[in-house]
Image (cartoon, helix red, strand yellow):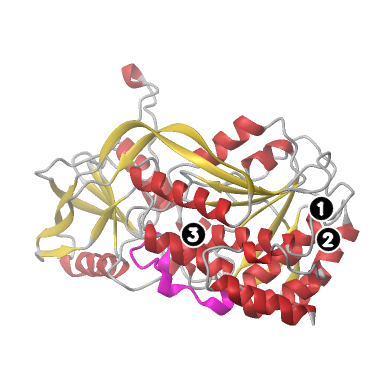
Amino acid sequence: MKTALYAQMVAIAALSLSATTFANDTAMSLEGMADATLTQDGIAWDFVEGITTEVGPRQAGTEAEKRGRDWAVAWLKANGFRNVADEPFEMQTWVPGDVHKAEIVSPFPQPLVVQPLGGSASTGADGITAEVVFFRTVDDLRAAPEGSLKGKIAYISHSMTRTQDGSQYGFAGPARWVGAGIAASKGAVATVIKSIGTDWHRNPHTGGTTFRTASGGADVGRAVLIPAGALSLPDAANLERMFARAKGKPITMKLTLTPRDLGVTTSGNVVGEIVGSDPSLPPVLLACHLDSWWNSPGAFDDAAGCAIIAAAALHVSHTGQPLRTIRVLFAGAEEVGLHGSTAYSKAHIGEPIAVGLESDFGADRIWRFDSNFRDSNPALHAKIAAAVARFGVSSGTKVATGGADLNIVRDQGGALIDLQQDGTRYFDLHHTPDDTLDKIDPVQLRQNVAVWAQVVGILANEAGPIKETIAPSDAPAIMNR
């Protein structure tokens, strides 16, 4: 009877902009709530549909990101969250500019589709025309002699494939993360890469890149910035065919990218809470990031993640007031360097967190649960694993390292959980114009919310320590995304 009532109330909430209709709902079991959520949740869809429709792209540090934060603050307040705030921080802000063009001048003249990488320098309005040098991998680029790229454009490829766990991102990602900086250090005037992605649409995948500092002389400590862009995968494949057909003859490209630096602007982190009954217990922290790149509304990356954690927190509250406070963190400026995660840790490092979880890998189904307390708190790990098995989620053996916006938990040496989503198609959409609402499968979105609600409900009502606090570990650093 309670499950039927809950399903009815969720359906009502799905038709409104507020979940406060749940406030007077009869408390029900956590399991019953999660089961009903699997088929009836409309809260997550309400969030992701709303922010992608009413705000759209949310480039970090810009007016559009500010509108996104204002929208999120209003949504959290309307849906009954307490202690809602926009916590500002300042950052250097880069924007892509208006001109993104790549053209093969010779020997096979034609346009290619390109977009700038975050942090790229400008070519100027007249562009740069130079010979292109082909590197199959970033390691091949590293092996190039110093000065060998003087006056040339470096092109960097890779062989990324689809994987369920997204592990190929770590394999291919360095072509974007550090490729331009390596090329600049060897004299290149610009860099283009094969997009870090797995689709075959003419949609380049953007993302941040970094530049090395000079190794000696008067420029010590000063990064050498050059224009850097990503070609769509079909255009990159076409360029590689040109190299094969040219048989050693030079390939010349004209590259025109006009990004610019706005200087210091304001970004911010949005927070809100489902307040627990025992304020002496550290909260459960649920994280996502609210910003996106300029080229899409960021439905998968990461409006869906914010939708999932907010919906899960609300659903737990519908089973009665939790013991621990559940805090949601919608981090700002993640895409351009984890500025929000860093700022949040700096501002709140003295406030212990019981456990951290992040949703930032799209909206497809969760298939595995990992924690970093499997050995130190096996009973709790086993309890969570058993509770999510009915949703098709396995118990993993890997040690959870947490998402990019959980710096505060890693800095405190605290408990972490990874709810691993199916990433098979994630890098088809990642950082492209195709990251739009229609790509979200509502059935898989609801499975995420159900699993999250089940796990968060257990954690928020756990009276004992989740994991003994220890000195911060040497967990691998999370790369800029």
193 and 201: which is toward the camera: 201
Residue located 59% across and 57% down the image: 79
**Where does the image place residue 208, in percent across and percent down from the top left?**
39, 47
What residue did someone put label 2 on? 381
Question: Which range of residues does the magenta coloring cover?
Answer: 429-444
Quadrant housing residue 456:
bottom right
The Cα atoms of the two marked residues, 1 and 2, are separated by 7 Å
Mark 1: secondary structure: loop
Left or right of residue 439: residue 13:
right
Label 2, secondary structure: give it.
Answer: helix
Pick the front one: 372 or 456: 456
Q: Disc 2 marks which amino acid? A: His
Q: Residues within 10 Å of mark 2 (few under 14, many from 20)?
A: many
- Image quadrant of residue 310? bottom right
Q: At which x and y percent is residue 247?
A: 18, 65
Within 10 Å of the Cα at label 1, are there few (<14), some (14-19), or many (20+) other Cα atoms? many
Alpha carbon distance from label 3 to label 1 = 29 Å
Q: Which is nearer the eye, 3 or 221?
A: 3
**Which disc is residue 373 wearing?**
1
Residue at the location (81% across, 60% down)? 458
Q: Secondary structure at mark 3?
A: helix
Residue under circle 3? 303
Q: Amino acid at mark 1?
A: Phe
Percent x, y of residue 44: 56, 66
Question: Are the residues tagged 1 and 2 within 8 Å (C-beta)?
Answer: yes
Counting residues from the start of the chain, the first of labels 3 and 2 encountered is 3
* Tag nearer the camera, 3 or 1: 3
Separation of marks 3 and 2 at Cα, in angstroms: 28 Å
